[in-house]
Image: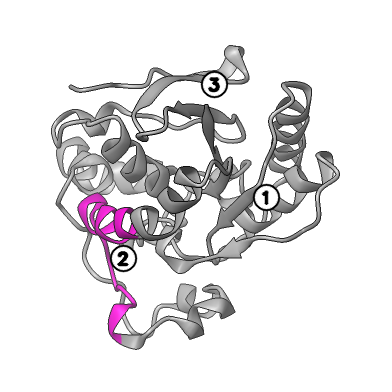
Amino acid sequence: MVKLILVRHGQSTWNAENKFTGWVDVDLSKKGEEEAKKSGQLIKSNNLKIHVSFTSFLKRAIRTLTIILDENDLEKKFNASWEINERHYGALTGLNKDETKKKLGDEQFKKYRRSWDISPPPISTDDKCLENFSPLNSGIPKEKVPKTESLKDTYNRVIPFFNQNVAKNLRNNNNVLISAHGNSLRALCKFLFNISDTNINKLEIPTGNPLIINFDESLNIKNFNYLDKSREKEIIVNQ
C-alpha cells in the first residue's frame, strides 16, 4: 500500500508564546527541533520509505522537513509550495491567544479560530508583522496573496494542490511526506476523511507526530495511525 505521511511542524517560537502565527515566518523552538528529530526517528524506526516530499514557504515547516530527511539519511530534496502555507490569520496575526479571547469573548474567539467559513478582519497594510513574512512569498501571484483567511479559504488552495501534485505521486506508488501546518493539514484531513463543516472544529493535529495514511490502488484509505501513540489525537471520519 502506498503511504501519505503528514507531519505538522514541530513547536515554533510563537507556538510557545501562544501567539497567532499564520504567515509570519518564525523558526522552531528548541522543543520543536526535538519534535522534528523524533518524527524523523519514528519514520526511520518504522522502516517507512519517503520517495517525494512537500512543504510550505514557511521556515518552521521547511526546517521540520529537513530534520526528518537528515534523520532518514536522505538528500535535502523537496518541493516547497505556498498553497500549503498556514492559514492567514489576518488582523489576529501576532496577538496572544489568551489576551485576544478575553478581549473578544469566547463566542467570537471560537468563530475566528475554529469556524469553517468565518475569517478574522484583514491584516492592515502597515502591520509590522508583514515585515516578518517569508521572503519566498514574493513569488506568489499578487492577486492570490490573502489578507485574511477562513479554514474554507485555506481548504480552497490546499485541495487543488493535493489533487494536482500529491495524488499523482501516490498513484505512481510513491510514498509522500508533507511537512505543513495545523490548519493546512486540518483542511487536507477534512477532504481525505470526509469531515463535515460542523465537526472539523473538533479536529486537532499535534505538532511533530507523523500521521500515516495507507491507500489502496484506487486511493481509497485503508487505514491510518499516528506513530507516537502517547501524543495521538482522534481522527474524525465521515462525520
Q: Is residue 95 left or right of residue 78?
A: left
Name the amino acid, label 2: Gly
Residue beneath the point at 59% across and 45% down: 9
> Is residue 204 part of the magenta span, yes or no?
no
* Crowd band around label 1 with a 10 angstrom C-alpha radius: few (<14), some (14–19), many (20+): many
Left or right, 162 with reference to 170 = left
- Horizontal and vertical percent position of residue 98: 39, 41
Q: Which residues are magenta?
A: 143-160
**Distance between mark 2 and mark 3 Cα atoms:** 31 Å
Earlier along the polypeptide chain: callout 2 or callout 3?
A: 2
Circles 3 and 1: CB atoms closer than 8 Å = no
Residue at x 70% of width, y 55% of height: 63
Of callouts 1 and 2, the N-terminal one: 1
Give coordinates of residue 226: x percent, y percent. 54, 21
| Element carrying mark 1 | helix
What residue is disc 1 on? 65
Helix, strand or loop at label 2? It is helix
- Tag 3: residue type? Tyr
Picture layout, residue 88 above or below residue 193: below
Q: Which residue is mark 3?
A: 226
| Label 3 element class | strand
Residue 233 is labelled as none
For residue 99, above or below residue 219: below
Judge left or right: residue 194 versus residue 208.
left
Relative to 186, does residue 83 appear above or below in the rendering? below
| Residue 90, label in figure | 2
Nearer the observer, disc 2 or disc 3?
Answer: 3
Q: Amino acid at mark 1?
A: Leu
Residue 144 counted in the magenta span: yes
